[in-house]
Image: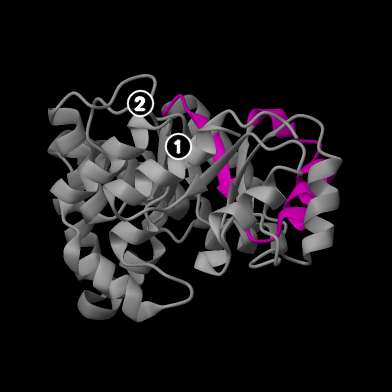
Amino acid sequence: MTKIKNILIGDNAFIGVSHLSHSKARETLQRLDAEKIVEVISAARSCGANGFTFTVHPTNLQVLKELIGSQSLNGSFMLYPTLPYAAGYVRTMTEKGVVGTLAEMFGQVSILDRAKLVLEGGVQSLAGNPIGVMRSYVNYELARIPKGAAIRSVLLHDVVTDLAVSYRSADLIQSYIENIRNKWHATPGFVTRNFSKFIEFFNQMGWNLRDVLVMTPFNRVGFQMNPSKEACEVSLSKLEGGKVIAMSIMAAGYLTLEDALDYISKLQNLDGITIGVSTPKHATETFARLKSL
């Protein structure tokens, strides 16, 4: 097994996401506020977590403000935002329509950032340019992250990534890579639930996988591993360079931590792991075990 360099805390528990039990997710969400989430993250950090992967959800933004305010974020604890926050846009669009959604978006950033967004992509978005739309949303969401946070990688949501790969939208992906690298000075990242197809597409385009980060499911039961568990394992074993973060390692709670790590420990070419926890005690136990890998 390759030495795991990055042990990240995920945000599913913080924003009420569970792929197995919606009722459990709601219970967790009801007892967590920004202050308690900060306590969970602090416990995870004290036991070896060196990063936080999260969607640009209002709760997470408040958590980041509190962490920055207490000077708890520094260069040794890196951020991995995943965007766009697709669920939030769908909900807001349904409730407020296009005009209301745009008004809410622009109302949440500074006047200076608002002007930059219009100049750098807003006009293209209104013209119906899909690359302009994506760039506008990406820049808008990153502008909402509090200043002072150390961002290692910005990850494109799997809904967009996998759609772009399926339609072989090379221009869109290339534009995203250039925008993240040149404007935000971070590593371009991608979340995918079809790792083999993503790797195949990158290789066909002649792009260097060493220049990006990929977050994708890996677990013993093949949960969310497409087109198959075996295909994903083969693609990982043949990977030359590249940084891969394994997510869903416990298959949304179906597996125990020990079962998950027994499987993960046999894989090659992993750069990191991300896992969600919901209490300081859970964080301490989980990340102390992960650190021993």
Q: Which residue is mark 1?
A: 288
Colouring of the image: one colour
Spatial CA span between label 1 and label 2 = 23 Å
* Quadrant the C terminus occupies: top right
For residue 187, side relative to residue 116 (left or right): right
Whole-percent x, y for residue 84 in the image = 41, 55
Task: Decide which of tag 1 and tag 2 comes sooner along the chain.
Answer: 2
Residue placed most toward the observer, 86 or 177: 86
Tell me the number on the disc at residue 186.
none
Number of residue marks: 2
Q: Nearer the viewer, residue 250 or 213?
A: 250
Task: Name the spot of residue 97 as percent of width and height, x first.
Answer: 25, 76
Numbered circle sitting on residue 150: 2
**Residue 35, horizontal then vertical, whole percent:** 14, 47
Q: Which residue is drawn at the image coordinates 43% and 30% (left, top)?
A: 48
- Residue 90 point in image, percent of width and height: 35, 72
Q: What residue is at 72 percent from the left and 57 percent from the top? A: 168
Which element type, helix, strand or loop, lies under badge 1?
helix
Give the amino acid type for the residue marked by disc 2 in the picture. Answer: Ala
- Which quarter of the rendered picture does the N terminus lie within? top right
Q: Which residues are magenta?
A: 184-211
Dot 2: what SS? loop
Above or below: residue 120 compared with residue 195:
above
